[in-house]
Image (tube, helix red, strand yellow):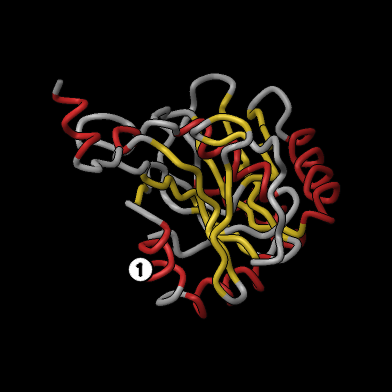
Amino acid sequence: MAVQSEQRQGARPRAPALYVYGIIPADVEVDEQAHGVGGPGTVQVIRHREIAALVSETDRSTGATDDDEPAGGDAHEDLLDATAAEVPVVPLPSGTIVPDRATVLEELLKPRHDEFARALRELEGRAEYLVELRYAESGRPSEPDVRALVEALAPVSVRLSPTRPTGRRDTARLAVLAETGRAGELERALDTLAERWAGRIDLRLFGPLAPYDFTPAR
């Protein structure tokens, strides 16, 4: 009876909120099978002048809480990394949820248009690569080794940045912003260093990734 009463009064179901992944150029078209937090086929773009927000509809409970990791984290990163392999993208933090399209436009795209447009121009043809350095016998990363890694990668990188702690005392990570067209050179530079460090240090390369460590994500 209560449901019937609400229907007579014209009550409307609450509209889903929008999960925002990141910012891309406005002329990018989204693949119909792009997989986001809401599953394949749910990813959309909201455009404003030169930029657009990459979003999908979501239940409001999908957002981050104070006690838990942001829900949808894997889907968030998978979509952004797949995007970064094709076009420039400014990633936003996992769990970024807004109530509606108007909020995306008025509080994100319009006031920060110039900042995001500039960042996208700087990221054109570039992506982040993550280099992991791990000691074979539980040693601790030394400053000379990290410096040697930086020196080896600097000639094929646009920028370098240390990343967050890994939780392992024997491991260090370095974020590299590089031209996607020079990924082969990046791999060869690491191969040369890996040969020198064989049996003492293992090197692993991940990417291309969205430029989490090189963009204004707040």
**Residue 11 falls left or right of residue 38:** left
Residue 82 position, x and y percent, is 68, 42
In terms of depth relative to the viewer, which is nearer, 98 or 208? 98
In terms of depth relative to the viewer, which is nearer, 92 or 129? 92
Residue 208 position, x and y percent, is 70, 45
Residue 108 position, x and y percent, is 41, 67
Q: Amino acid at mark 1?
A: Glu
In terms of depth relative to the viewer, which is nearer, 216 or 87? 87
Residue 88 position, x and y percent, is 67, 60
- Residue 149's place in the image compared with 102, above or below, is above
The residue under the point 21% across, 26% down is 4
The residue under the point 80% across, 38% down is 191
- Residue 136's place in the image compared with 115, above or below, is above
What quarter of the picture does the C terminus occupy?
bottom left
The residue under the point 72% across, 44% down is 31
Q: Secondary structure at mark 1?
A: helix
The residue under the point 58% across, 74% down is 117
- Residue 180's place in the image compared with 137, above or below, is below
**Residue to which mark 1 is pinned:** 107
Q: How many marks on residues? A: 1
What quarter of the picture does the N terminus occupy?
top left
Residue lying farthest to the bottom in this orientation: 114
**Residue 27 falls left or right of residue 62:** right
Q: Callout 1: 10 Å neighbours few (<14), some, many (20+)?
A: few
**Residue 47 falls left or right of residue 105:** right
